Amino acid sequence: MVAGNRGTHLERLVEQASRRFSAAENGRQEVTRPMEDLVLLRRGSPSSLEASLYQPVLCLILRGAKQVSLGEQAISFGPGECLLVSHDLPVRSRITKAPYLALVFEVNVATLRKLYDEVAPSALDSERARAAETQRADAGLLDALGRYLALADHPADARCSAPSS
């Protein structure tokens, strides 16, 4: 069981991520990559709709809000909510509320496939399966992402914790 509540973990993550940017926001999107598979995004103002190709990621909104459109389906999510994208996916997205701060964890597809093979077929709900899904991040996920982001300050520890390829 994870100590602390969901709000405390989210506040800690906001603080950790914010420290990785300069104090002044420029209104445009800023990107920093504290680790190879971890990206932090910050934007001081809402954005226009932009087309892009999302790769497999877990995107956790720390501040602000975002809307992602997949064909006719629009998904909106805000602080403490995450978007999981399971494979390359063409989308249109925009920041709808700023200031915006997000943590993007790049998902290793080979690891996902291995996990999928290990999960019993009866545990999978093929009718609910989607290429992109949002959900509220629980305290355990927020804690794990916070500990992973903290590893960026300790490169030797990060290398020891990285998955072997």
Image (cartoon, rainbow, N blue to C red):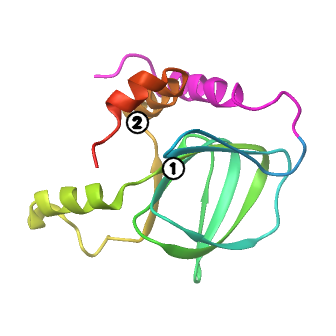
Near mark 2 (Cα within 10 A), the count class, few <14, some 14-19 or many ≥20, is some
Q: Amino acid at mark 1?
A: Cys
Residue 126 as seen in the image, left or right of residue 70:
left
The picture places residue 113, in percent across and down from the top left corner, at 24, 63
Q: Dots 2 and 1: beta carbons under 8 Å?
A: yes
Place of residue 14 in the rendered image (x, y in percent of width and height, measured from the top left): 64, 29
User: Of 129 and 15, which appears nearest the observer?
Assistant: 15
Mark 1, residue position: 82
Q: Which residue is at a point 27% across and 55% down the rendered structure image?
A: 111
Q: Secondary structure at mark 2?
A: helix
**Which residue carries the number 2 mark?**
141
User: Magenta segment: does it hold 164?
Assistant: no
Kindly state the secondary structure of the residue where label 1 is placed.
strand
Magenta residues (range): 1-25
Image x and y of residue 77, in percent: 60, 54
Who comes first in sequence, dot 2 or dot 1?
A: 1
Q: Give the side of residue 30 with respect to residue 102, left or right.
A: right
Residue 22 belongs to the span the image colors magenta: yes
Image side of residue 40 versus residue 1, left or right: right
Which is more toward the observer, 31 or 141?
31
Q: In this view of the protein, which residue sits in the foreground, 125 or 43? A: 43
**Alpha carbon separation for disc pair 2 and 1:** 10 Å
Amino acid found under the numbered disc labelled 2: Leu
